Amino acid sequence: MRPLFTLNNRLSLCAEMVRKGAKIADIGTDHAYLPVWLVRAGFASFALACDIKAEPLMQGELTIKKYHAEDLVETRLCDGLNAVNPEEADDIIIAGMGGETIVHILSDANWLKDKSKNLILQPMSKHELVINYLYKNGFELKEHKCTTCDGKIYTAFLASYTGNTKTPDEVFTYTGLLKNDDENDLRFLNSTVNHLEKKSNANPHFGEIADKIKARFLL
Ligand SMILES: C[S@@+](CC[C@H](N)C(=O)[O-])C[C@H]1O[C@@H](n2cnc3c(N)ncnc32)[C@H](O)[C@@H]1O
């Protein structure tokens, strides 16, 4: 059998959050690298590789065939989780998309409000929208990790439903962190502060949030 490829740091960050033996749904799978890797490496028992567009899904099918994962990965053409049944996935991965799209996908799938489901979310932008949506809808972050890939900083959240809704404070909304644990957290915090400071030209409130983040984590 063809040797398995290596995931990049960004996708590895998501893979590390998958529960051993879980059935997974990878939403916005594109080349299906993550589901193929997870089943072939023995971390997931079955995977749905879903995408809203046919072309990426065809690429995904090529990856599935190339790595002989046909029995363990099924492709599905759908918007978000619209064609996924709750019993088909324990861990739901939504990676490589903007925060707005992730929120759209989550808010369209009410069955995710189930304490047994884990959400693995890797926003490429506007992570604050995802954190805000999660807490206001009864989810909480169980883990938040950052990594560097090709010189860029990336973030991924592990979240699940608790039923307790709350409005997170602004510092948590923009950082998702309770402490600054390692050098990747530090890079993520600095990049968030830089982003907010740029936006403060248009609205000084973003500068105030940046100052609060610096005071809590960086001074
Ligand atoms: C940049 S790729 C990310 C691929 C992979 N998840 C990763 O992290 O490397 C984004 C993929 O999400 C798909 N996508 C965008 N919106 C979607 C939606 N609402 N439902 C399902 N897939 C979607 C796109 O077609 C594209 O293939």
Image (spheres, helix red, strand yellow):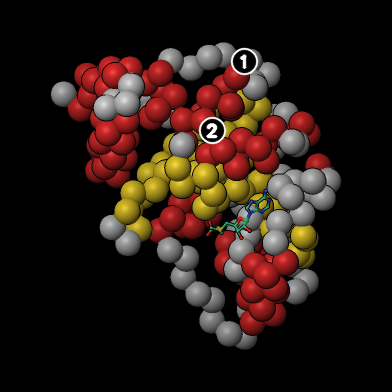
Towards the viewer: 61 or 90: 61
Examine the rendering and report whether any part of residue 111 can be seen: yes
Image quadrant assignment for residue 33: bottom right
CA–CA distance in space, label 2 to label 1: 14 Å
Q: Residue most toward the left?
A: 219
Question: Image point 31% across, 36% down: which residue?
Answer: 195
Split into quadrants, the picture shows ligand 1 in the one at bottom right
Q: Residues within 10 Å of mark 1 (few under 14, many from 20)?
A: some
Residue 103 at what x, y percent from top left? 61, 35
Residue type marked 1: Thr
Q: Is residue 138 above or below residue 18?
A: above
Helix, strand or loop under label 2? helix
Q: Could you tell me which residue is drawn at 57 percent across and 22 percent down?
A: 135
Residue drawn at (71%, 47%) of the image:
80
Residue type, label 2: Val
What mark, if any, has residue 103 been given in the picture?
none
Residue visible at 77% across and 60% down? 77
Q: Quadrant of the C terminus?
A: top left
Q: Is residue 97 left or right of residue 200?
A: right
Give the mark toward the camera: 2 or 1.
2
The residue pinned by badge 1 equals 165
Left or right of 39? Residue 176 is left
Q: Residue extending furthest bottom?
A: 1
Residue that badge 2 annotates: 130
Residue 50: which quarter of the image?
A: bottom right
